[in-house]
Image: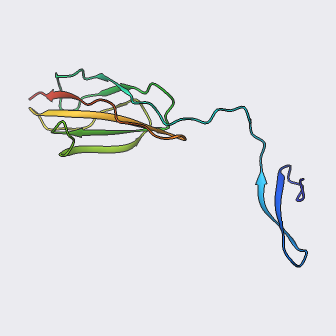
Amino acid sequence: GDFDNDGDTDIFLVTGDGEYHVINNLRPFDVGATPLNAPTSPTLISPINGETVSKSPTLLWNENCPTTSNHVQIATDVNFSSIVFDKSGITTSHHSPDLLDIQTYYWRVRGTNTGGTGQWSDAESFITEN
């Protein structure tokens, strides 16, 4: 019932002395709504694998499913043990970091939504120009 007359269904606790306390207000929701799963791995679009780019390349990817934010990593090795750029909370499907010139970099992306954090994309490489 709605014991505090605020339009919500209330759950309450009755104590041993007969006192009751509202412990939760339930708001209506769509019981047919499907819970969101963690995002699938994004698809890297640009730069394409092995491409030579500027020192501030625009990284583009396809999220493949709804995300609330993205996490981008750039490293100087394919195993990502030497990460030079690590940023989460990116709310777009593109980003432009500042990097060193004449260097091979590897990059990957993963998304997050209310269902959790997804898997990393396959890593791809690019080379910065002088």
As drawn, 68 above or below 4: above
User: Along the horizontal axis of the image, is 40 left or right of 87?
Assistant: right
Residue 21 location in percent, x, y? 83, 68
**Camera-nearest residue between 45 and 81:** 81
**Farthest residue, direction bottom:** 17
User: Along the horizontal axis of the image, is 78 left or right of 115?
Assistant: left
Q: Place residue 70 in its image quadrant.
A: top left
Q: Place residue 93 in its image quadrant.
A: top left
Residue 122 location in percent, x, y? 29, 29
**Residue at horizontal 25%, vertical 23%?**
47
Residue 11 location in percent, x, y? 81, 58
Q: Which of the colour schemes (rainbow, by chain, secondary structure, one colour) is used?
A: rainbow
**Residue at horizontal 29%, vertical 34%?**
108
As drawn, 82 above or below 111: below
User: Along the horizontal axis of the image, is 46 left or right of 16?
Assistant: left
Residue 130 location in percent, x, y? 8, 29
As drawn, 25 above or below 18: above
**Farthest residue, direction front:** 16
**Number of callouts in the render?**
0
**Residue at horizontal 78%, vertical 55%?**
25
As drawn, 50 above or below 114: above
